[in-house]
Image (cartoon, rainbow, N blue to C red):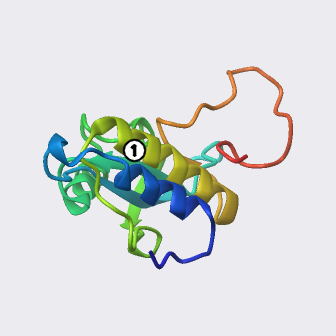
Amino acid sequence: MTPAFDTGGWRKIQRLADSEDPSMGPARYHLYVIEVEALVPTMRYLFYVGYTGKSPEIRFADHQAAGAKAWKHFRKGNARAVRIRHDLMEGLPTFRTLRSAKKAEGSLARIISTHMGPAYSDQVKSRKKGAPQKSTRAIGTN
């Protein structure tokens, strides 16, 4: 892998793909990263991380259209999908199982949050509404 920044987290993502049983069929799930433009002051995410059985470009178009399959913040007009961040996806493996893809999505979002800025993923638990924030670090960081 040749990511935009060096981190041991990339190895964890690769190990997830390597540990999949080849009998599960071909690798078909891709991870993707979208740069987010905030359209309201409360939007705190700079990136959206997801997985797809389609191509990342098709999923990006879904998010840009802000239709039913888009992230809720794109649908509500809180944010805009700016572009696919190929530099943050370069060298990422594809996955045979949905389970591995979801785990890898969460790992990638945490890596990006730590090194690049706040990244949203459905696979990263965030604090409960109304709960005090423990630090100034972005949601999804370790």
Q: Position of residue 37 (x, y in %)?
A: 51, 59
Q: Residue at image x 54%, y 77%?
A: 4
Q: Position of residue 82 (x, y in %)?
A: 41, 64
Q: Position of residue 111 (x, y in %)?
A: 60, 57
Residue placed under numbered mark 1 in the picture: 74
Q: Residue at image x 69%, y 58%?
A: 114
Q: Within the image, what quadrant is residue 124 found in?
A: top right
Q: Secondary structure at mark 1?
A: helix
Above or below — where is 126 with respect to 30? above
Left or right placement of residue 22 versus residue 129 in this view: left
Mark 1: few/some/many CA within 10 Å (<14, 14-19, 20+): many
In depth, the one of 10 and 133 nearer the eye is 10
Above or below — where is 98 with respect to 11? above
Count how many numbered circles sit on residues in the image. Answer: 1
Q: Position of residue 65 (x, y in %)?
A: 25, 50
Left or right placement of residue 129 versus residue 35 in this view: right
Q: Residue at image x 53%, y 49%?
A: 107
Q: Within the image, what quadrant is residue 71 found in?
A: top left
Q: Residue at image x 34%, y 62%?
A: 93
Q: Looking at the figure, which quarter contains the N terminus?
A: bottom left
Above or below — where is 11 with respect to 129? below
Does any portion of residue 123 appear in the rendered image?
Answer: yes
In depth, the one of 82 and 30 nearer the eye is 30
Left or right placement of residue 89 versus residue 6 in this view: left
Does any portion of residue 39 appear in the rendered image?
Answer: no
Left or right placement of residue 124 versus residue 88 in this view: right
Amino acid at dot 1: Phe
